[in-house]
Image (cartoon, coloured by chain):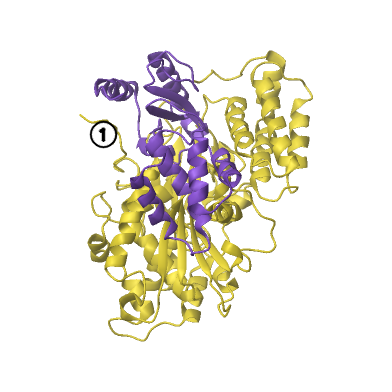
Chain colours: A purple, B yellow
Amino acid sequence: MISEASKLRFAREVAKYPADQRQSAVMACLAIAQQELGYVSPEAEREIAEYLGMSPMAVHEVTTFYNMYNQRPVGKYKLNVCTNLPCQLREGVSTLKYLEAKLGISMGETTADGMFTLQQSECLGACADSPVMLVNDRSMCSFMTPEKLDQLVDGLRATGEK
Amino acid sequence: MTAQHILSQFRATGVQTCFHDRHISPQILLGLNGANWRLKDYESRGGYQALRKVLGIGGGEPMTQDQVIATVKESALRGRGGAGFPTGLKWSFMPRQFPGQKYLVCNSDEGEPGTCKDRDIMEFNPHIVIEGMAIAAFAMGISVGYNYIHGEIFSTYDRFEEALEEARAAGLLGNNILGSDFSFQLHAAHGFGAYICGEETALLESLEGKKGQPRFKPPFPASFGLYGKPTTINNTETFAAVPWIIRNGGQAYLECGKPNNGGTKIYSVSGDVELPGNFEVPMGTPFSKVLELAGGVRTGRKLKAVIPGGSSSPVLPASIMMDCTMDYDSIAKAGSMLGSGAVIVLDDSRCMVKSLQRLSYFYMHESCGQCTPCREGTGWLSRVVDRIENGHGRPSDMDLLDSVAEDIQGRTICALGDAAAMPVRAMIKHFRHEFEYHVEHKTCMVPAYV
């Protein structure tokens, strides 16, 4: 179930568009639902479809087209490391490999404790900050040297927030 | 410490990429420090004076729509998103007398590998985009606009929303702006990870709440755009250039650059340089100067090649590049494109097969699947480059790549097919010997890089 707080945020998005174009808010609503639930479940898609007056399949088309929507549960922290060419030239790939070794998983996997999901990503649009990593869709982390990666991963672990 | 606190420590400050003294006569990035992005700071830099001038507020006659468009035409401002289309001409295509709703859209879906300028503009100087859009809306008689922002830069989207709130509260957006009879509602929207949405008609589809698959053109957005209504779409940096042009005149802007290439341009320099970042310099600045601003090639290495305008633009060898100036016409003459102005620098330790392998994978991953030549062709290109890199290439593979690329180019609805094909053809044209070496020796001719 999507919370009332998220529904209030939906309303703010819908208000940006003409009254007969509620569907325009679907991208934002899915992102809000993902922020609350961790992923976009079929139930969330149905709720959003109903809220916006769309067919559930039309919502599902959007979920599956865009890379950042999680179609299944992910770890508490989703780490997306850019490895596109400008980042490949500046330690992007070694950053990904460093995290694979540190977390003991391969890219695409989630740690057994459910804390971290590690993914390779396409261009994040922060090429001069390489190596860059996006955490949970909303926090861009720049110039991620191994020391900073340690700080980030160990720090998040130490918060004890599961 | 909360998780949010931990993550915020790694947020970019802009010091390395934007707040340095290595711009030349900057207009958009002038005087920024990261803290002075708010409305009052922008106004203290002369912000919103251009909008006031257009509306005739604070003395002086208001400008007419024709005068604004004529000024932009005179400036020779060309689209900063990649195509380099003359902005004033595009604005003149909008049917101003159309009786129904018209829309203005800002394309901030900055995902062309190598490009990171619009992010810094919106993060550190968001009001310059708002002012530019308001002036454009006035010139074309448009009352509603959207800024579609790359989903990956969410904190920048949040920043832009904050700036919008400030502008609305100050009467710079909304109904009867600054007491005039001009009204303009501007909103921010975001993507969520689809390179293709940087293509303007895919962006419109996405803004309508659909998967971002490009539309056939014609009809062009000027006649059939958002919700089927006349729509003008420009890049973030293009709008950001407008306030300066209105304040100082089209001729003054033109004179900053060179004929047919007016003004300054922000180049995102990435890859094998000492100091990657954004550099705002006059159009027509020598490439060698831009390279120098970025600290030069990494210490101890030599320049091998440059991808001058984002990953889709054809690669150029160092010898050609060092003779170029950075503007649309010079780079086109050299056989590539200025594109978005994203300069990806490769040094002499780089294997061109491995570099192309990553790019070809990207285009395969991001093809929307609508057109067969692109959907199938990008996969084909990626797999063939893969096998060459992995030591399974065949002597005929270079010709095969060229032929597949040729069969994609010009045969798709949008430019993604061309964008996938051009890097392949240019790599083989200029660095065929490296591909041949790979096929013959099943290994790389330059030291492997990670």
Q: Is residue A145 left or right of residue B45?
A: right
In this rendering, the count of numbered labels is 1
Q: Residue at x 75, y 41 (%)?
A: B372
- The residue beneath circle 1 is B9
Left or right position of B237 against B159:
right
Say which chain tag 1 marks.
Answer: B
Q: Position of residue B282 (x, y in %)?
A: 43, 57
Can residue B204 be seen here?
yes
- Which one is nearer the viewer's eye here, B19 or A39? A39
Between A40 and B358, the one lying in front of the other is A40
Q: Nearer the viewer, residue B361 or B348?
A: B361
Residue A89 spot, x, y in % from top left: 48, 29
Residue lying farthest to the left in this orientation: B1
Q: Residue at x 72, y 48 (%)?
A: B412
Q: Residue at x 36, y 58 (%)?
A: B28
Image quarter for residue A60? top right
Q: Residues within 10 Å of mark 1 (few under 14, many from 20)?
A: some
Relative image position of residue B395 (x, y in whole percent) = 77, 21
Q: Position of residue B386 (x, y in %)?
A: 65, 23
